[in-house]
Amino acid sequence: MWPSKKSQPTIRSLVGEGTRLKGELHFHDGMRIDGEVQGDVLAEGDGRSLLVISEKARVYGKVKACHVIINGEVVGPVEATEMLELQPKARIVGDVRYELLEMHPGALIEGELQPLKSGERPALKLAASNDS
């Protein structure tokens, strides 16, 4: 997990609002989606990756990256190998696998939640807790 936001990968790619992309999308470092993607969105390489799916974004396919932040809609499975942040307007229809999960009130998941390391107690952080 990253010790601070400064060490997160730089967002180098953008699917802008009003853009619709069909097909598999592969990226390195960081990517932000504000439009619609009909196909899988997958981080490549063993390095750290950041994927931001904004409030207006829609992804219809598999999503996989190290750190995933969702505030839009994903119809398909989601896998975050380090951290998954679900913002208040996040909507996921599909199974979710994660290392660490932060879920804000209002986020919705229609699917199964599974920690990546089965057998271990999952690490959950309640975004509305006062323990921060």
Image (spheres, rainbow, N blue to C red):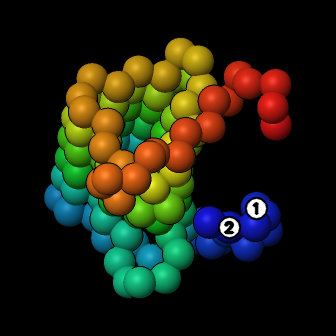
- Toward the viewer: 98 or 72? 98
Q: Secondary structure at mark 2?
A: loop
Is residue 82 at least partly visible in the picture? Answer: yes
Side (left or right) of 61 relative to 32: left
Residue at which label 1 appears = 5
Q: Is 17 rendered above or below residue 105?
A: below
**Identity of the amino acid at label 1?**
Lys
Mark 1 burial class by Cα count in 10 Å: few <14, some 14-19, many 20+: few
Give the residue displayed 75% in from the left and 67% down from the top.
3
Quadrant the C terminus occupies = top right
**Identity of the amino acid at label 2?**
Trp
| CB atoms of marks 2 and 1 within 8 Å | yes
Quadrant the N terminus occupies = bottom right
Give the residue displayed 30% in from the left and 54% down from the top.
118
Side (left or right) of 1 relative to 56: right
Provide residue 62's location: percent of width, then percent of height: 23, 51
Provide residue 25's location: percent of width, then percent of height: 28, 64
Is residue 21 at least partly visible in the picture? Answer: no
Residue at which label 2 appears = 2
Provide residue 29's location: percent of width, then percent of height: 52, 75
Give the residue displayed 68% in from the left and 67% down from the top.
2
Q: CA distance from mark 2 to mark 1?
A: 7 Å
Q: Which dot marks residue 120?
A: none
